[in-house]
């Protein structure tokens, strides 16, 4: 209702944004969001900032299929410059992209929100 992506209700879960492509779809651009943490509790994406270009990400689907991705980019984007539509549009040949998104930067005064978003992008490989 606020034009924002819903996030998991707790810090331990990540969720697939259902207006993005299904994970592993070719061509496709999938988005998974999760919390970095809350106060002293580490969230599911608390170490997302440690992923670098060339690192591998493995996703096991509900039907036990294993999808392997390789990180192609990691960047922090100020909230005012962040647009989810940048990660929903797909313009890259026949690949499957995965975007992992969490909060980063500093907590905004008087709120529990952060001033930036960390986006790790990875490409499906065999």
Image: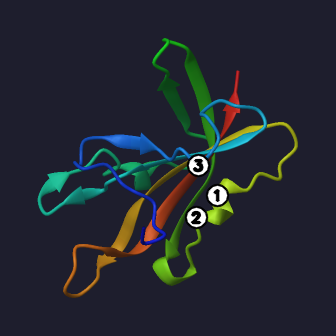
Q: Nearer the viewer, mark 1 or mark 3?
A: 3
Picture coordinates of residue 82, whole percent (x, y): 55, 74
Q: In this view, does 46 lie to the left or right of 24?
A: left
Residue 55: image quadrant is: top right
Q: Residue 109 carries which label?
A: none
> On the rendered image, what quadrant is the N terminus found in?
bottom left
Q: How far apart are marks 1 and 3 (CA)?
A: 11 Å
Q: Is residue 33 above or below residue 83?
A: above
Q: Do the residues labelled 1 and 2 touch (CB within 8 Å)?
A: yes
Question: Which residue carries the number 1 mark?
Answer: 87
Q: What element carries label 3?
A: loop
Q: Distance between the residues labelled 2 and 3?
A: 11 Å
| Earlier residue among tags 2 and 3 | 3
Which residue in the rendered view is the most extreme toward the front? Answer: 1
Q: Closer to the camera, 70 or 39?
A: 39
| Total numbered circles | 3
Residue found 33% across the figure and 74% down from its top: 114
The mark that comes first in sequence, 1 or 3, is 3
Q: Which mark is residue 19?
A: 3
Q: Residues within 10 Å of mark 1 (few under 14, many from 20)?
A: some
Q: Which mark is residue 84?
A: 2
State how far apart marks 1 and 2 are (Cα): 6 Å
Image point (18%, 60%), residue name: 38
The C terminus - image quarter: top right
């Amino acid at each position: 209702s606020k034009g924002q992506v819903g996030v998991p209700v707790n810090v331990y879960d990540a969720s697939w944004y259902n207006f993005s492509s299904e994970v592993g779809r070719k061509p496709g651009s999938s988005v998974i969001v999760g919390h970095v943490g809350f106060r002293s509790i580490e969230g599911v994406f608390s170490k997302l900032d440690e992923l670098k270009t060339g690192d591998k990400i493995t996703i096991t689907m509900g039907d036990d299929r294993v999808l392997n991705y390789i990180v192609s980019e990691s960047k922090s984007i100020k909230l005012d410059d962040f647009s989810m539509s940048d990660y929903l549009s797909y313009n890259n040949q026949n690949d499957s992209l995965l975007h992992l998104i969490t909060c980063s930067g500093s907590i905004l005064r008087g709120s529990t929100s952060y001033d930036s978003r960390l986006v790790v992008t990875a490409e499906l490989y065999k």
